[in-house]
Amino acid sequence: MKLERIVTSTNEKFKLRFLAMERSLRATGCDVPIWVIPYDQTRFDLPPNAVWWDLPELRQFLFENQATPLTPRYYCLTISNYQFVDADVIFLRNPSVVLSEQEGFIASCGHWNNPAHTYTADSLKVLKKITTRWPARVFNAGQFACDRALYTVEQLKQTCLDPLHAKTCFNFDQCGTVLLANLSGVKISNLTLPPVNMESTWAGSYEDDNFEEYWTDESRKPYLLHWAGVTWPVPVDRLFTNFLTPDERQLWEKEAEERTLKRRSLKNRLRKVRDASRNFLREIGEVRTPW
Ligand SMILES: [Mn+2]
């Protein structure tokens, strides 16, 4: 496929991660535009060749159906020739070059080996009907590429609204993305499976300091690294922090300290209460804004 854009999603809180992702992409020599889906209303000034991207019709639709906040990643399914990445990703190789040899829908995670959290009870029934090899067609929704639009906006809405799919699509963005891609009939390949056999793109796979020893064969070196669900710190963190300025690195370390403290503190429990009460308000249909 011919890569025409990177799509991501971020907000002010994830700005440092976004900046590292952007700089790592440019460092590989890739100059395609970056389309940034706003996660919430806390936007910031983007670097050159990056633009905020929203699809108001789909945002409104997801809001009306009380979809979880990460579901706007479904916007990608209506466009072509893109690589989607979460902001907690950095690029190690030029995605334009890596993807030029691929077609269809391209995953690059290790979920085939551990498909938990890629399906719901409902969507698993659908996946199993499509093929007995369904674990090879599930993937992490924070890193995928595709050369074609899988749906029009209208088709996407109708597919989400199908009673067989609605709970999955509106409540679980990762399971929803997997389900929607599988339902489209597109060929789904995963670069960590044959014939490419790329080494892991998950930061948590690299437990030792000498992780670069896995990457001596350039053709099998991961083209991106994703920190999905990894509790910092891990040895590959330095590949991420290398892209921050000294000031940003200080800020990052401060944020990291705060995160550690928060994990252990009472605040965490209070947050859970807050989330539970928000969910309760949603449950009883209390009005909220699309954000
Ligand atoms: Mn992620």
Image: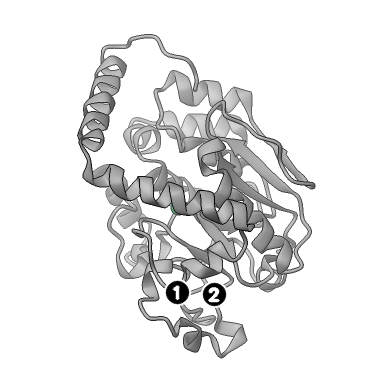
Q: Give the total number of marks visible in the rendering.
A: 2
Disc nearer the start of the sequence (1/2): 1
* Disc 2 residue crowd, few under 14, some 14–19, many 20+, Cα 10 Å: many
Residue 63 x %, y %: 47, 22
Q: Is mark 1 within 8 Å of ligand 1?
A: no
Judging from the image, what secondary structure is the residue with disc 1 in? loop
Res. 149 visible in picture: yes
Q: Which residue is mark 1?
A: 200
What residue lies at 37% left-to-right and 45% top-to-bottom?
A: 258
In the image, 30: left or right of 285?
A: right
* Disc 1 residue crowd, few under 14, some 14–19, many 20+, Cα 10 Å: many
What residue lies at 38% left-to-right and 64% top-to-bottom?
A: 233
Q: Amino acid at mark 2?
A: Pro
Which numbered tag is attached to residue 222?
2
170 and 149: which one is in front? 170
What residue lies at 45% left-to-right and 74% top-to-bottom?
A: 200
Q: Amino acid at mark 1?
A: Ser
205 and 62: which one is in front? 205
121 and 273: which one is in front? 273
Whole-angstrom CA distance, mark 1 to mark 2, is: 6 Å
In the image, 33: left or right of 61?
A: right
In the image, 274: left or right of 239?
A: left
Q: Are marks 1 and 2 in contact (CB under 8 Å)?
A: yes
Rendered image quadrant of residue 135: bottom left
